Image (cartoon, rainbow, N blue to C red):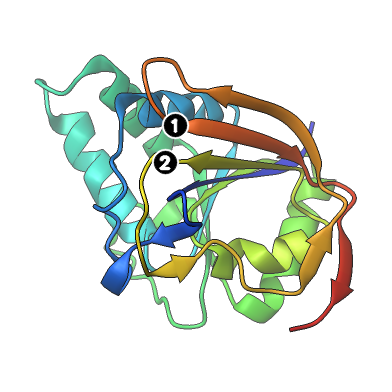
């Protein structure tokens, strides 16, 4: 069944990045990666913004080659390197020498909504982590099926807010759980009927 699933980690004060774009203010407990692996195993395609895709693929390549890496981390790397990749960017240019060249499609921001809609119509299961600047247009277009907001037990104090677009209502809370062995609270929403009430 086609779907677009978004998962993002935020501080208790609603920041997905701390000061200067730093993510280290949000402790990444083991349960965070267990959650990510579960979502990855249901995905055909990863959807990225311009910033994170190369770092994630490089990190996963190194992890897959590390014989001493933990089994869970190698499992994450295996999925990341196996699935297709859709990069939303007006600036990214790929080189045929890139090791993941054949598994990556780059689309402009103006084309991204139509491309995700097309892929969903073809039954694709897509997964996104992170930046709301990339997934916000999909939410506003009614293309996000599920949203996971993982709330960390800490305050960033400043940084980038989870969302700064028009008012969105009509999301349905499916579940709220503390991830095992952690202080992360996972809020799981059905986003298939968003009500966009005003532009900002």
Q: Residues within 10 Å of mark 2 (few under 14, many from 20)?
A: many
Image quadrant where residue 21 sits: bottom left
- Asked if residue 63 lies left or right of residue 117, the reply is left
Q: Report the residue marked by disc 1.
A: 184
* Picture coordinates of residue 49, whole percent (x, y): 48, 65
- Asked if residue 189 lies left or right of residue 159, the reply is right
The answer to whether one can see residue 99 in this image is: no
* Picture coordinates of residue 198, whole percent (x, y): 85, 78
Circle 1 sits in a helix, a strand or a loop, which is it?
loop
Q: Residue at x 37, y 53 (%)?
A: 155
Question: Would you place residue 100 above or below residue 182 in this image?
Answer: below
Q: Residue at x 84, y 48 (%)?
A: 121
Q: Residues within 10 Å of mark 1 (few under 14, many from 20)?
A: many
The answer to whether one can see residue 152 in this image is: yes
Circle 2 sits in a helix, a strand or a loop, which is it?
loop
- Asked if residue 112 lies left or right of residue 22, the reply is right
Nearer to me, 161 or 80: 161
Question: Would you place residue 152 above or below residue 160 in this image?
Answer: above
Q: Residue at x 27, y 25 (%)?
A: 74
* Picture coordinates of residue 163, whole percent (x, y): 60, 65
Q: Which mark is residue 2?
A: none
Image quadrant where residue 172 sits: top right
| Sequence-first tag of 1 and 2 | 2
Q: From this viewpoint, which residue is outermost toward the left?
A: 68
Nearer to me, 50 or 129: 129
Quarter that holds the N terminus = top right
Q: Residue at x 37, y 67 (%)?
A: 51
Tag 1 near tag 2, CB within 8 Å: yes
Q: How far apart are labels 1 and 2 at the CA level?
A: 5 Å
Q: Report the residue marked by disc 2.
A: 152
* Picture coordinates of residue 165, whole percent (x, y): 68, 74
Question: Would you place residue 1 above or below residue 133 in this image?
Answer: above
């Amino acid at each position: 069944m086609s779907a677009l699933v978004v998962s993002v980690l935020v501080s208790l004060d609603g920041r997905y990045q701390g000061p200067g774009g730093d993510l280290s203010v949000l402790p990444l407990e083991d349960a965070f990666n267990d959650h990510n692996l579960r979502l990855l195993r249901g995905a055909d395609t990863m959807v990225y913004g311009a910033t994170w895709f190369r770092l994630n693929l490089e990190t996963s390549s190194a992890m897959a080659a590390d014989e001493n890496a933990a089994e869970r981390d190698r499992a994450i790397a295996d999925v990341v390197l196996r699935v297709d990749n859709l990069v939303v960017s007006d600036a990214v240019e790929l080189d045929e020498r890139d090791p993941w060249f054949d598994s990556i499609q780059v689309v402009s921001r103006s084309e991204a909504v139509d491309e995700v809609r097309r892929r969903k119509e073809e039954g694709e299961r897509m997964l996104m982590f992170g930046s709301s600047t990339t997934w916000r247009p999909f939410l506003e277009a009614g293309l996000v099926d599920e949203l996971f907001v993982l709330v960390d037990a800490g305050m960033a104090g400043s940084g980038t807010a989870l969302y700064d677009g028009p008012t969105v209502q009509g999301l349905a809370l499916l579940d709220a759980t503390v991830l095992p062995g952690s202080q992360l609270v996972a809020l799981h929403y059905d986003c298939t009927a968003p009500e966009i009430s005003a532009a900002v």
